[in-house]
Amino acid sequence: APKDAKVLSKPFHLRDLVAEVDRMLAA
């Protein structure tokens, strides 16, 4: 997915990663 590619292609903080995972799990 393009969204996943964007997330993986840019540096991100662990907090952002955790928030993203939490959002996916809650979906």
Image (spheres, rainbow, N blue to C red):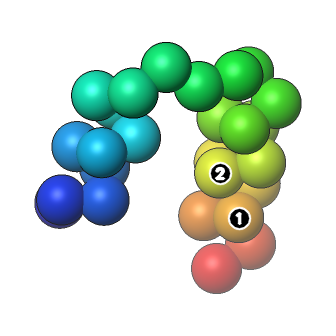
Q: Position of residue 27 (x, y in %)?
A: 64, 79
Q: Quadrant of residue 26?
A: bottom right
**Left or right of residue 19, residue 12 in this image:** left
Q: Which residue is mark 2?
A: 20
Q: Amino acid at mark 2?
A: Glu
**SS state under label 2:** helix
**SS state under label 1:** helix
Question: 3 or 22: which is nearer to us?
Answer: 3
Question: 11 or 23: which is nearer to us?
Answer: 11
Q: Does the residue at mark 1 contact the one at mark 2 (Cβ under 8 Å)? A: yes
Q: Position of residue 17 (x, y in %)?
A: 66, 34
Residue 24 position (above or below residue 20) = below
| Separation of residues labelled 1 and 2 (CA atoms) | 5 Å
Q: Position of residue 4 (x, y in %)?
A: 31, 49
Q: Position of residue 18 (x, y in %)?
A: 75, 37
Residue extending farthest to the front is 10
Q: Residue at x 17, y 60 (%)?
A: 1
Q: Residue at x 59, y 25 (%)?
A: 12
Q: Amino acid at mark 1?
A: Arg
Residue 4 position (above or below residue 9) = below
Q: Quadrant of residue 15?
A: top right
Q: How many residues crowd around disc 2 within 10 Å: few (fewer than 14), some, or many (20 or more)?
A: few
**Left or right of residue 7, residue 5 in this image:** left
Residue 24 position (above or below residue 6) = below
Q: Residue at x 65, y 51 (%)?
A: 20
**Left or right of residue 3, residue 21 in this image:** right
Q: How many residues crowd around disc 1 within 10 Å: few (fewer than 14), some, or many (20 or more)?
A: few
Residue extending farthest to the bottom is 27
Q: Which residue is mark 1?
A: 23
